[in-house]
Amino acid sequence: MIFTATVAYFLPMRRRDEVCAVILAGGKSRRMGTNKALLEIGGRPLIRILAERLRPLTNQILISSNDISSYAFLDLPIVPDRFAGQGPLSGFHAAMLYRECPLYVVLACDLPNLTLPLLRRLIRLVEGFDAAIPRTSDGIAHPLCAVYRRSCLHAVELALARRANKVVETFLEYGLLVRWVDPDEGNFKDTDLANINTPEDLRKLIGSPPA
């Protein structure tokens, strides 16, 4: 079935208690040289900005990290990996086991231009799918700014058990239904999904502090 952009307007918006947000903060930040999640923008750590931006969506916000002390100031649950050293998929998996919820908004910790309307759009578009994953205009998927259903948990566990750590490859291999959301349908710009890997990225992306 082909879905047009207008369909999303008629899909129900989920209640706050049906959505869990997971901020992935387990990366090494090697190219940045310092912890990206703690970079200050307008006097606030980036991870706090993201957490505050998520509050209109849900009161269930988790931090995926093995470094509990660095994020204690957020006063949010910090969930360590159960499959050590297996990347974002492992963080997503641990969060699903920690908090049972129909939908999970999964975000990298370094998305300074992320908008709340995009997340609301993805939550609507995941209806009838296992995941709603945005793609930029160059066709590149962004699975670390996406919405997932709990229905994918078994496939994620199978992938991790055999040390297959890639999110998109896992969904394709196990036949999960993905709704790919392009800029026109998601009503977003490519720069909304841009992340920070280096100091130069930070200079380019942050012209002014995010609202």
Image (cartoon, rainbow, N blue to C red):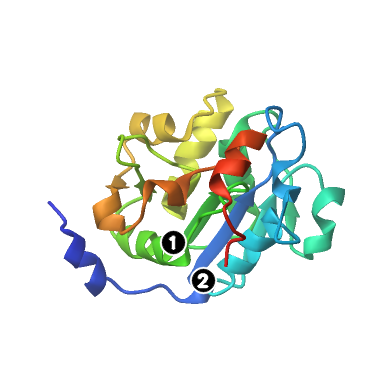
The residue nearer to you, when weighing 84 against 88, is: 88
What residue is drawn where x is 59% and y is 58%? 208
Is 49 on the left-hand or right-hand side of 45? left
Q: CA distance from mark 1 to mark 2?
A: 8 Å
What residue is drawn where x is 45% and y is 42%? 143
The residue nearer to you, when weighing 210 against 154, is: 210
Three-letter amino acid code of the residue under disc 2? Leu
Is 77 on the left-hand or right-hand side of 147? right
The residue nearer to you, when weighing 162 against 1, is: 1
The residue nearer to you, when weighing 199 against 13, is: 199
Residue 129 x/y as whole percent: 31, 52
SS of the residue under disc 1: helix
Q: Residues within 10 Å of mark 2 (few under 14, many from 20)?
A: many
**Image quarter for residue 187?**
bottom left
Q: Does the CB distance between marks 1 and 2 fall below 8 Å?
A: yes
What residue is drawn where x is 73% and y is 48%? 39
Where 196 sits versus 75, above or below? above
Q: Which mark is residue 57?
A: 2
Q: Which mark is residue 102?
A: none
Is 120 on the left-hand or right-hand side of 97? left
SS of the residue under disc 2: loop
Q: Which residue is mark 1?
A: 119
The answer to whether residue 93 is seen in the rendering is: no
Residue 182 x/y as whole percent: 28, 48
Q: Residues within 10 Å of mark 1 (few under 14, many from 20)?
A: many
Three-letter amino acid code of the residue under disc 1? Leu
Is 68 on the left-hand or right-hand side of 21? right
Going by the picture, which residue comes out furthest to the left?
1
